[in-house]
Image: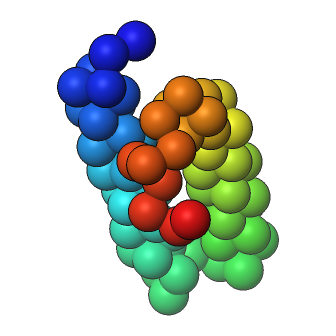
């Protein structure tokens, strides 16, 4: 993978994380407690998969792209 591709994938992955977080926010005051917890779990699992199966691969090959280091 070239760094240019890694940057593009990272951009899309982080956009997905933001979108999932927005979805959870939308549910916060408009869903039942049970529904909110289900959405929260789904969002958490999804973000975890993005982190471990996309971003971690990119950061391993291109550590300079990791903004949290």
Using residue 6 as the reference point, say whether residue 42 is left or right of it: right
Is 48 drawn above or below residue 55 in the view shown? below
Q: Position of residue 27 (x, y in %)?
A: 49, 72
Residue found at the far top of this picture = 1
* Residue at image point 56% right, 65% down: 69
Colour theme: rainbow
Q: Nearer the viewer, residue 6 or 14?
A: 6
- Count of numbered badges drawn on the protein: 0
Q: Position of residue 50 (x, y in %)?
A: 57, 39
* Residue at image point 61% right, 34% down: 60
Q: Which of 50 and 69 is in front in this view?
A: 69
Quarter occupied by residue 39: bottom right
Q: Where is residue 8 in the image (x, y as percent from the top left)?
A: 25, 32
Q: Nearer the viewer, residue 8 or 41?
A: 8
Is 48 drawn above or below residue 19 in the view shown? above
Q: Is residue 63 visible?
A: yes
Q: Is residue 16 visible?
A: no
Using residue 6 as the reference point, say whether residue 34 is left or right of it: right
Quarter occupied by residue 33: bottom right
Q: Where is residue 13 in the image (x, y as percent from the top left)?
A: 40, 41
* Residue at image point 43% right, 49% down: 64
Quadrant where the image shows the N terminus: top left
Quarter occupied by residue 7: top left
Is 18 drawn above or below residue 13 in the view shown? below
Residue found at the far bottom of this picture = 29
């Amino acid at each position: 993978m070239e760094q240019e591709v890694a940057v593009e994938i990272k951009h899309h992955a982080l956009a997905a994380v933001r979108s999932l977080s927005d979805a959870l926010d939308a549910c916060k005051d408009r869903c039942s407690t049970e529904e909110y917890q289900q959405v929260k779990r789904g969002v958490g699992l999804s973000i975890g998969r993005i982190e471990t199966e996309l971003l971690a691969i990119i950061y391993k090959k291109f550590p300079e792209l990791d903004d949290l280091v």
